[in-house]
């Protein structure tokens, strides 16, 4: 996977912060940001979108978790943030889905 462009990530976070005061960013997961989701007509919910598999890989590498531990941690501590005001969205890329097939 290509390395994240830190300048682009910072620009994305700064742009979204201007668009939405309720934006939730996840500390330590900036390299897992894919982009933005902006509500219909620019009037809806604007949130950051994170790559689920990158988060799991980061937990494995950074926190020395097994894959199973990382998935469990993600499910119970990170994924649940989607329902909160300004909470991010998490995307599973199609190639990640196809790996298990």
Image (cartoon, rainbow, N blue to C red):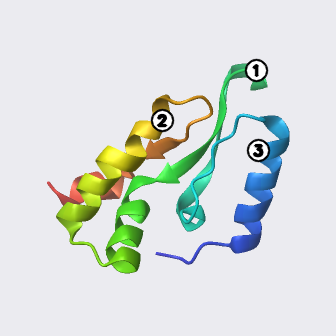
Q: Quadrant of the C terminus?
A: bottom left
Q: Which label lies toward us, 1 or 2?
A: 2
The circle on residue 43 is: 1
Above or below: residue 31 compared with residue 91: below
Seen from the viewer's position, the closer of residues 1 and 86 is 86
* 99 horizontally vs 39: left or right: left
Decide: marks 3, 2 in contact (CB < 8 A)? no
Residue depicted at 85% across the width and 42% down the height:
18
Q: Which residue was labeled with disc 2?
A: 82
Of the image marks 1 and 2, the number of the one nearer the N terminus: 1
Which of the 4 image quadrants contains residue 46? top right
Q: Label 3's element?
A: helix
Q: Label 2's element?
A: helix
Of the image marks 3 and 1, the number of the one nearer the N terminus: 3
Work out how far the residue at label 3 is from the one at label 1, CA to CA, in angstroms.
13 Å
Decide: marks 3, 1 in contact (CB < 8 A)? no
- Residue extending farthest left: 101
Q: Which residue was labeled with disc 3?
A: 16
Q: Label 1's element?
A: loop
Of the image marks 3 and 2, the number of the one nearer the N terminus: 3
Residue depicted at 82% across the width and 48% down the height:
15
User: Badge 2: few (under 14), some or many (20 or more) residues near its Cα, within 10 Å?
Assistant: some
């Amino acid at each position: 996977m290509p390395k994240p462009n830190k300048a682009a990530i910072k620009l994305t976070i700064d742009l979204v912060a201007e668009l939405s005061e309720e934006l939730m960013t996840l500390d330590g997961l900036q390299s897992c940001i894919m982009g933005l989701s902006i509500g219909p007509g620019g009037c809806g919910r604007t949130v950051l979108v994170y790559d689920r598999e990158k988060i799991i890989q980061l937990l494995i590498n950074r926190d020395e978790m097994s894959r199973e531990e990382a998935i469990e941690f993600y499910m119970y501590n990170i994924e649940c943030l989607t329902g909160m005001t300004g909470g991010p969205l998490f995307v599973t890329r199609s190639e990640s889905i196809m790996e298990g097939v």
